[in-house]
Image (cartoon, rainbow, N blue to C red):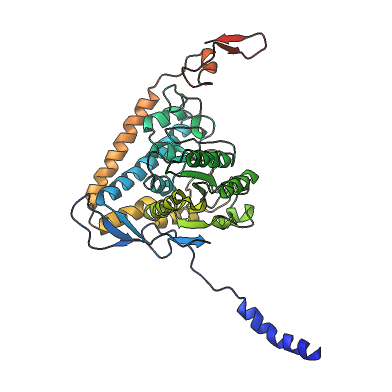
Amino acid sequence: MLFRTAWARQALPLRRQAFTPLARRSVTTDAASAHAENIPQEDDKPFTVRLSDESFETYELDPPPYTLEVTKKDLKQMYYDMVTVRRMEMAADRLYKEKKIRGFCHLSTGQEAVAVGIEHALNADDKLITAYRCHGFAYMRGGTVRSIIGELLGRREGIAYGKGGSMHMFAPNFYGGNGIVGAQVPVGAGLAFAQQYNEQPNTSVILYGDGAANQGQVFEAFNMAKLWNLPALFGCENNKYGMGTSAARSSALTEYYKRGQYIPGIKVNAMDVLATKAAVKYAKDYTVAGNGPLVFEYVTYRYGGHSMSDPGTTYRSREEIQRMRSTYDPIAGLKQKIIDWNVMTEDDLKNLDKEARALVDEEVAIAEAMPVPDNTSRILYEDIYVRGSEPRWMRGRTVDETFYY
């Protein structure tokens, strides 16, 4: 007994040393960390981009390839899309401050690489559902700037006929824009189930914020998706802050890509649009092949507050925001690579910026000129049913009121 005790005392330092975790690199947020050589002259000829070794971390999964095939045309389009989304959000910011947009308004300035990177990895038949920071996704899924701004202004020509506002927007195979925190996640699992049931070779991208990651319905959806091996790409947009607090203060485990437990996960540098596209493309192939769902963590950053009513500086410093803007901006990062790779000159990029700005300005002006809804109760009963499928009548606001279609 004495021998065993003495041996244990001697072995204790060795055992502690053996279980000391090794230091590892974390996912970078550098938006300009990719490299490329032998770039062709032609706009539509593919070439290989080498992503940073710090683009991904994985959980119970081999990492995506660190190379991506792109064309000059692809890079130009991704840059244009991100600039357009940002200009659109800046326009929404202005209109809200002018009190033309009322109610809730959640902007995604700084997070453009998430929406653009995901969309460039999908096709039109894939499905996407997200939370209320949805303007960029609505645009990338086929909405127009005028229809999105018109919706924010409450106009009848808005993308949801002026009834959804900032939080509720829909487009073909885009299922919102959802206001209840985390509630879109089980709905997204249902979308993936429908794709599997109908034997469609597609995936469903299901997005939620770090603030919603602790919702019980998120884990219920994980469980069902894994039981049935659904083609679902669950994804936490980790922009570091929830509504008025940091992720570290609200979540006991901030490695959101490990939250699936029995579902493999990928953490991706979502300030880099190329890394985002590469990860989602890899994940789509994985799920469509019948391997079941994945859990993503898109590491990103929002420059503004949680919503327009939140200054965003009471729980973080202005210096932090400025450092992220000046060092890790997704648009500036891709711009630097486009110049370095001789895809476009700086002057050409300025012209592209002007084109995007002119488009957004024109579309916003059209949206502002849209007529406001008629002041009639009839509008209350429209769009409850799919247009053309309404019943002959329905009960009104009180038991003695009936509305006839």
Residue at image location 55% in from the left, 53% down from the top? 316
Q: How many marks?
A: 0
Foreground residue among 326 and 301:
301
Residue 156, image x, y percentages: 44, 21
Residue 171, given in percent of the width and then of the height, sits at 43, 32
Quarter of the image with the N terminus in it = bottom right
Residue 113 pos. (x, y %): 40, 49
Give the percent coordinates (x, y) of residue 245: 60, 50
Is 179 rendered above or below residue 213? Answer: above
Camera-nearest residue between 120 and 304: 120
Name of the residue lying farthest toward the bottom: 3
Horizontally, is 83 left or right of 390 in the view? left
Q: Residue furthest right?
A: 1
Reply above or below: 177 against 318: above
Q: Nearer the viewer, residue 111 or 218?
A: 218
Seen at 37% across and 22% down, the residue is 369
